[in-house]
Amino acid sequence: MEIKPHQRILQAFGIDAAHTDIRKFGSGHINNTFLLQRQDGSRYVLQRINAAVFREPEVIARNQRMAADYLAQHHPGYLFITPVPTVEGEELFVLEDEYWRMIPFIEHSVTVDQADNPTQAYEAALQFGRLARYLDGINLQPFRPTIPNFHNLTLRYSAFQEAIRNAREDRRRHAETLTARFLQFSDIAVTYERLKTAPLFKDRLMHHDTKINNVLLHKDTYKGLCVCDLDTLMPGKIISDLGDMVRTYVCPVSEEERDFSLIGIRDEYYEALMDGYLSETGSTLTKVEREQLFFAGKFMIYMQGIRFLTDYLKGDVYYPVKYPEHNYNRAMNQLVLLERLVEKEDHLQAIIRKCLGPGGNDI
């Protein structure tokens, strides 16, 4: 059931409901989002934070505020979307245990749900890279995770093994071959376990959800304007953001595709996103990070694949499904994507070296 903003919520942000047009907005599935247009022409985005996913909404607000303060001091011209305070000066309004926030609508902006050409992939990756570069050097100590263990592959792999042991017999047998194929890539989990504590594989303030619809593009030129949807802004590793872009930009079809013959790696999209991201972050990367740029795609695709298969083995308890083998097919989709990526490793590593420029041959 759709949750509409109560008049008290609008009043908390100084909005007169009688003189404001309110409509559902965006394509996100986690938070309830509305576009508010006032009679004076000003527009705002009002959101209800999904507290079932984000158990401590105050952490989201605090992380964003600390990042905004740092950026205002060190990069004052950067467009970083921050909440509009309530009339009481708070960044969140709580009504009946529901958390609401309001942010300014960025004029002349649009989002796209998939990369339709390499230029869009480049622009989106550049924006995520710029945010990472501008936040390089921020003190991470006060930041907390908004979703603990969100990209912890060690935890996801452990849950996968537990699901294999405890699966209902019919599901375990149906997924036996697929499970075995994923287990053949278990070295990805081993590599992650080794990397996550490596001294030069540094923690950074990462976005953690770098799908292309989390970048605002100019409605006429499609040039990148800024990053949006900052709920998962928290400490992490560079492979999270870069890997999520590889997973979602380079394949011509989504994770929902059941014709697996359509799954592949579009070289020009891979090069575009690497070029965009590394043009911003390249100078900040450690040697270990540079060496693991290709691994980023393997890491994220593998983690998402075993999450889908884990959910299938457990009886579809997390991801919404539309038919009995939905999560099984999602997992198969990601496995095929992983296989296609690995098949092209030598060529894609050459692209990375090219995008890194001088010194790229050192990886």
Image (tube, helix red, strand yellow):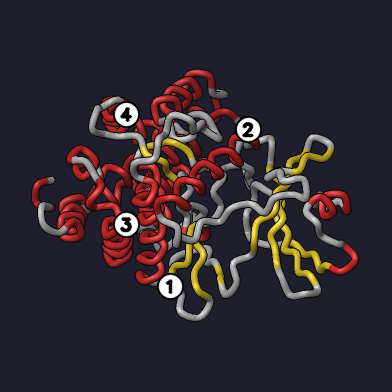
Kind of residue at disc 2: Val
Most foreground residue, 38 or 234? 38
Q: Is residue 265 visible in this depiction of the protein?
A: no
In percent of the image, x 50 and y 46: which residue is there?
69
Mark positioned earlier in the residue sequence (1 or 2):
1
Kind of residue at disc 1: Lys
Which numbered disc covers residue 223?
A: 1
**Helix, strand or loop for disc 4:** loop
User: Disc 3 designates what residue?
Assistant: 277
Most foreground residue, 114 or 3? 3
Picture coordinates of residue 39, whole percent (x, y):
81, 74
Picture coordinates of residue 228, whole percent (x, y):
53, 56
In percent of the image, x 60 and y 72: which residue is there?
107
Kind of residue at disc 3: Tyr
**Helix, strand or loop for disc 3:** helix
Q: CA distance from mark 4 to mark 3?
A: 21 Å
Residue 93 relative to residue 128: left or right: right
Mark positioned earlier in the residue sequence (4 or 3):
4
Q: Identify the image quadrant of residue 116.
A: bottom left
**Circles 4 and 3: CB atoms closer than 8 Å:** no
Disc 1 crowd rating (10 Å Cα; few below 14, some 14-19, many 20+) is some
User: Disc 2 designates what residue?
Assistant: 317
Disc 2 crowd rating (10 Å Cα; few below 14, some 14-19, many 20+) is few
The vertical placement of 190 against 19, above or below, is: above
Mark positioned earlier in the residue sequence (3 or 1):
1
